[in-house]
Amino acid sequence: MEKKEENKNSDGWVWVVVSDKDGDGHYLGLYSEEQEVNFIPTFPSKEAANDCFLSLPRKKGEKYEVQAIHLDELNQDAEKSGFTIAMVDSEGKVIK
């Protein structure tokens, strides 16, 4: 089953970092000064998300975890909140 989770991207699944703020989960969103856009970093695999996790800016006192989400649901949530989605590699570089 763990192997299936690692390959969720092939079925339209991506990996995101979620913060548990006041008991309500929120995607970790970032702002690109270069492109002047708010975005949610997504990862093609759980391994890539975990590798990049420590280099992402985070707020002290909040709990974070890596979770899988279907790309369609993430697109809807991002659009409602005024964010775009950026596929990021394990080193934090935008790849798509």
Image (cartoon, helix red, strand yellow):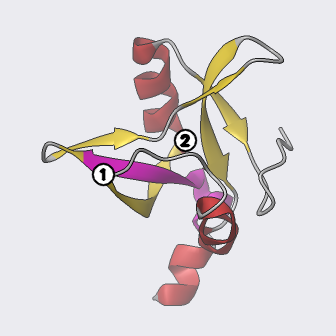
| Highlighted range, magenta | 8-20
Quadrant (top left/top right/bottom left/bottom right) for the N terminus: bottom left
Examine the rendered structure and indicate whether residue 36 appears above or below residue 54.
above
- Mark nearest the camera among 2 and 1 is 1
Q: Secondary structure at mark 1?
A: loop
**Which disc is residue 62 wearing?**
1
Residue 11 shown left or right of residue 32 in the figure: left
Q: Residues within 10 Å of mark 2 (few under 14, many from 20)?
A: some
Position of residue 17 measured from the top left corner of the image (x, y, whole percent): 48, 53
Examine the rendered structure and indicate whether residue 47 appears above or below residue 22.
below
Is 16 included in the stretch rendered in magenta? yes
Position of residue 6 measured from the top left corner of the image (x, y, whole percent): 60, 76
Q: Residue at x 47, y 35 (%)?
A: 74
Examine the rendered structure and indicate whether residue 86 appears above or below residue 9.
above
Location of mark 2 (residue)? 71
Q: Residue at x 68, y 14 (%)?
A: 37
Is 24 included in the stretch rendered in magenta? no
> At label 1, which amino acid type do we have?
Glu
Q: Residue at x 75, y 18 (%)?
A: 33
- Chain-order first, disc 2 or disc 1: 1
Q: Residue at x 41, y 44 (%)?
A: 59
